[in-house]
Amino acid sequence: MTKIIERLLLFIDCQPISNREFEKKTGLSNGTISKLRAGNGIGADKLANICCEYPALNPNWVLKGVGNMLQKNSGVEGDIDEQNEAPTNKVQQTVNEPNTEYNKNCSACNEKERLIQQLSDRILELQNRIEELKESEKEAREERREYKEEARIYRTELRVLQKEYNNIISQQDNSQSKAS
């Protein structure tokens, strides 16, 4: 799942409406949010529709992770009141209130990030181990070739010695037969 999709889903999760209502409001097909959660991508046109429907959503935050989720001074209801900086809509209240679903999602995200990091570390360990085993296997093959070559040399030497032995025995038998 890309960081863009992760940020978009975080924004969607902060909305006080159901996923289906969000999909209808933004012109997304039924089930699009579920597909996003499953790892599917989203087209630029759909992202543009979401940003048009939610002008307080900061496109730089969605696309690049730059800035805050919500823009100040977007000229729509729900912007932060400049005089007292108090949030005036449910999205901002959700973002700013402790112990909200948003914060639960953040701890869930943190837990997922921790798990992802652990899994990434384990994958790296396993990849390194595989490389070590491949190297060991290569060394073992080379050692096996050396042993085979050594065994071939010994077999050749054994054949030569057996021939010499047989020749000596044969000569000895011939000498004894002539002597008798």
Image (cartoon, helix red, strand yellow):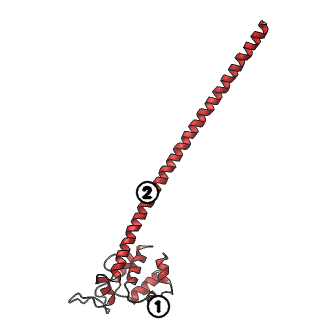
| 100 vs 67, nearest the viewer | 100
- Residue 60 can be seen in this image: no
Residue pointed to by mark 2:
125
Mark 2 or 1: in front is 2
Dividing the image into 4 quarters, which one contains the N terminus?
bottom left
Q: How far is the residue under mark 2 from the one under mark 1?
A: 45 Å
- In the displayed image of the protein, which residue is found farthest to the front? 180
Judged from the image, the secondary structure of the residue bearing numbered disc 2 is helix
Quarter occupied by residue 108: bottom left
Residue at 63% across / 26% down in the picture? 157
Query: Label 2 crowding class (10 Å Cα cut-off): few <14, some 14-19, many 20+?
Result: few
Q: Earlier in the sequence, mark 2 or mark 1?
A: 1
65 up-or-down from 153: above or below: below
For the residues labelled 2 and 1, say whether their Cβ atoms are less than 8 Å apart. Answer: no
Residue 17 is left or right of residue 78, and the answer is: right
Number of marks: 2
Q: Which residue lies furthest to the top in this view?
A: 179
x and y, in percent, of residue 123 in the image: 45, 60
Question: Which residue is the site of mark 1?
Answer: 24
Residue at the location (64% across, 30% down)?
155
Measured as percent of width and height from the top left, residue 72 is found at: 28, 85
What residue is rendered at 50% in x and 50% in y? 133
Quadrant location of residue 94? bottom left
Residue type (three-letter) at the residue carrying disc 1? Lys
Residue 106 position in % (x across, y down): 35, 76
Q: Which amino acid does label 2 sit on?
A: Glu
Q: Name the residue furthest bottom.
A: 77
Q: Residue 96 carries which label?
A: none
